[in-house]
Image: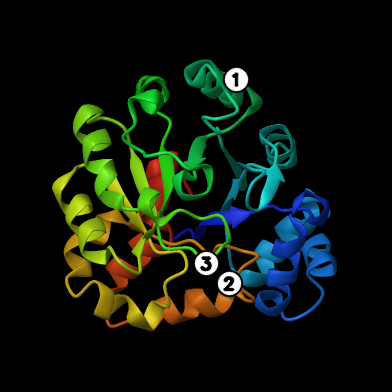
């Protein structure tokens, strides 16, 4: 069974906003600049870190959020991941910076990106805005999965009104073959909405980054009914030890089959991986 981390920020210190580096100090239990460089100074260092945490594949996220966290460019992430098939790049497209969203997705795919992560809460747009629809049409045509930040965030500049997963109902209905992934599964206010959307729409999935594993049976009492729809992610560097989270998921009162799907098999299916 593969272990796949579907949510990893390959963030260099010089790409971060100063406040974000300071925020990471407590999350990483030490100097964030030093720890970031230790893990992602080279692709080989990243692979060694993955081995130490028991991870087979990692989805590495670009992020064009100059108002909030900083800029992790699509070009840099694609080049970083090109050194190993275990590193899977996901692009970010900021609709306030790019005019032709469909062409930008095509460009990112040519760079090597296998998926897309969108940040409505940080880039201040509604996911069901028709401004974004050409991007969805292109992604559906190309078979590119899209992950969204859903749920709350404490980062300054966040606008919670854009975080509601309910906006994805329109997207799923209008693009029924498009694979959609709700990062954080509606964390905070909207667990029930995220669960219902995943249950209602064939290609909508829940990603559990940022949720304490021991709380999953509380947040989602019927989670095993959606065993094929739940995906693991770490949100590194906002977590000190990924292996601890993996172990916590293994200890949950679910069947081994459910836990294997959560930790890797569902993600492998979406990414088209064979292990």
Q: Earlier in the sequence, mark 2 or mark 1?
A: 1
Q: Nearer the viewer, mark 3 or mark 2?
A: 3
Residue 174 lies, with reference to residue 52, above or below; the image says above
Q: Is residue 136 visible?
A: no
Query: Label for residue 242?
Result: 2
- Res. 213 image quadrant: bottom left
Q: CA distance from mark 3 to mark 1?
A: 32 Å
Position of the N terminus, as image quadrant, is bottom left
Residue occupying image coordinates x 53% and y 15%: 103
For label 1, the SS is helix
Nearer the viewer's eye, disc 2 or disc 1?
A: 1
Q: Is residue 163 left or right of residue 176?
A: right
Residue depicted at x 51% and y 30%: 95
Q: Residues within 10 Å of mark 1 (few under 14, many from 20)?
A: few
Q: Decide: few, some or many residues near mark 3? Use Cα within 10 Å; few <14, some 14-19, many ≥20.
A: few
Q: Are marks 2 and 1 in contact (CB under 8 Å)?
A: no
Q: Position of residue 173 (x, y in %)?
A: 19, 33
* 192 shown above or below 114: below
Which quadrant would residue 221 be assigned to in this image?
bottom left
Residue at mark 1: 107
Q: Secondary structure at mark 2?
A: helix
Q: Mark 2 packing: few (<14 Cα in 10 Å), some, or many (20+)?
A: many
Residue at mark 3 to residue at mark 2: CA–CA distance: 21 Å
Of residues 127 and 181, which is closer to you in this image? 127
Q: Is the residue 159 above or below the residue 79 in the image?
A: below
Query: Which mark is on residue 154?
Result: 3
Q: Tell me if label 3 and label 1 are in contact, CB under 8 Å.
A: no
Viewer-nearest residue: 153 or 60: 153
Query: CA–CA distance between discs 2 and 1?
Result: 32 Å
User: Which comes before the other along the chain, label 3 or label 1?
Assistant: 1
């Amino acid at each position: 069974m593969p272990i796949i981390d579907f949510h990893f920020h390959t963030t260099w210190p010089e790409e971060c906003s100063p406040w974000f580096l300071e925020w990471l100090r407590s999350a990483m239990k030490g100097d964030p600049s030093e720890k970031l460089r230790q893990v992602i100074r080279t692709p080989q260092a990243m692979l060694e870190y993955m081995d130490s945490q028991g991870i087979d594949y990692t989805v590495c996220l670009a992020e064009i959020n100059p108002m909030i966290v900083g800029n992790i460019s699509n070009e840099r992430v694609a080049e970083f991941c090109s050194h190993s098939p275990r590193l899977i790049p996901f692009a970010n497209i900021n609709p306030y910076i790019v005019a032709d969203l469909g062409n930008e997705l095509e460009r990112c795919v040519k760079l090597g990106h296998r998926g897309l992560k969108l940040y409505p809460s940080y880039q201040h747009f509604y996911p069901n805005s028709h401004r974004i629809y050409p991007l969805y049409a292109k992604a559906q045509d190309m078979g590119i999965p899209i992950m969204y930040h859903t749920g709350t965030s404490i980062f300054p500049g966040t606008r919670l009104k854009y975080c509601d997963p309910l906006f994805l109902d329109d997207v799923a209905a209008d693009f029924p073959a498009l694979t959609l992934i709700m990062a954080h599964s509606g964390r905070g206010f909207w667990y029930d909405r995220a669960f219902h959307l995943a249950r209602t729409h064939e290609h909508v999935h829940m990603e559990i980054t940022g949720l304490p594993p021991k709380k999953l049976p509380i947040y989602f009492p019927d989670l095993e009914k959606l065993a094929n729809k739940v995906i693991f992610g770490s949100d590194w560097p906002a977590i000190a030890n990924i292996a601890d989270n993996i172990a916590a998921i293994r200890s949950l009162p679910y069947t081994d089959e459910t836990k294997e799907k959560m930790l890797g098999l569902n993600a492998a299916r979406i990414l088209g991986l064979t292990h």
